[in-house]
Amino acid sequence: MTLTEVVERLGLRVVTPAGSGDSKVTGGYTGDLLSDVMANSKAGNLWITMQTHQNILAVAKLKDLAGIVLVNDRQPNEETMRKADEEQVTILSTGESAFSISGRLYRLLARP
Amino acid sequence: MLRTFKADLHVHTCLSPCAEVKMSPLAIIKQAKAHGVDILGICDHNSAENVAAALQVAREHGVHVLPGMEVTSSEEVHLLAWFDAIEPVQQLQEIVYRHLPGENEEETFGMQVIANADDEVLGFNQKLLIGATTLGVREIVEEIHSLGGLAVAAHIDRESFSLLGQLGFIPGDLPLDALEISPALSHEDAMCKYSFSLPLLQSSDAHKKEEIGSCCTRFLLERVSIEEIGKALEGREGRKILRW
């Protein structure tokens, strides 16, 4: 499933549209410890987190993640948004909790 | 003339909910003195309300106390701040208190005892000191510097509440003065593991009395001041960090 389809199906808000919507979402990874995400997320994962520090962009680039979903309506600061445009990283947001949006993404991506 | 100072720059008092209640300023200074610690950094979580008592006791016992604090950022990173005097740490405390939501629950997190120099209880801090402020790491480091202090990332080798654990790597725009290693790593292991351009130092992060002075950094300084320690961190004018 492409990132654009996932965004539509889960009703995510697009905060920074810089990345490619055509990229394939291979799965998800949920976590707020960036050291853990660097160690365990996989390329193409949609990363669900509440961290908004600009280091999230470097992690997303490094691991070639499909995008970042900020939960509980958290907003990145201007510096992070500006860098997301520069670095071509898609930041999305939702009012839902990490638990809820992870569950819905899991169901969406699960093979029948 | 330069001489060696043994410094344990990260010690909690009974004000921190996670520290032993018997960590009164008087007990801490006596323990430090008994273990040959010359410089003690008093760094409670998000508060400095026991610094005044520690400074008073320290003067009587011939130990140097650096007024300090361990501030929790919005990213849940612990940052240490050290100052020359009590006023700047009180100013930092005002800023921190304005950005620290919540109330303490003693039964869950522990007591937050404010003590005087004579081991008497003056009161209990009601704030949620164990919580996180709404200030980002860079804002905190900038506030510490504008108040004339040194800003250090605490226990970077730990997974929880550390700069590396929470943020994965050291943000390029963060003007830190040093990085602290927890007692879990030896000097050799820390030197092998990390190759940052920032200086490393080690302290006990004591929450219990017997931990005070168990893990120290030795500095070559002319006297105890933030300026001298700053020079030692940068290796300037003969001041330096000696082996831990």
Image (cartoon, rainbow, N blue to C red):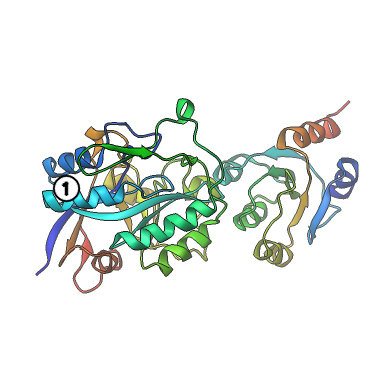
Q: Using the rendered view, name the quadrant where residue A96 is placed.
A: top right
**Residue B186 appears left or right of B179:** left
The answer to whether one can see residue A55 in this image is yes
| Mark 1 Cα shell of 10 Å, populated few (<14), some (14-19), many (≥20) | many
The residue nearer to you, when weighing B52 against A111, is B52
Q: Is any part of residue B213 visible from this angle?
A: no
Residue B195: x and y in percent read 39, 56
Please determine whether, in this image, residue A99 is positioned above or below residue B144. Answer: above
Subunit that carries the residue with mark 1: B
Mark 1, residue position = B37
Q: Quadrant of residue A32?
A: top right
| Residue in the picture at 12% in, 50% down | B60
Of residue A103 and residue B125, the one placed in the foreground of this image is B125
B66 horizontally vs B79: left or right: left
The quarter of the image holding the N terminus of chain B is bottom left
Where residue B73 appears, as percent x and y from the top left, is 52, 51
Amino acid type of the residue tagged 1 in the rendering: Val
Q: Position of residue B177 (x, y in %)?
A: 37, 63
Specify whether B160 is left or right of A68: left
Residue at position x 31%, y 46% in the image? B50
Given residues B125 and B96, the one toward you in this image is: B125
Q: How many dots with numbers?
A: 1
Q: Quadrant of residue A89?
A: bottom right
Q: Residue at x 66, y 45 (%)?
A: A50
The image shows residue A9 at horizontal and vertical percentages of 90, 41
Q: Residue at x 22, y 44 (%)?
A: B117
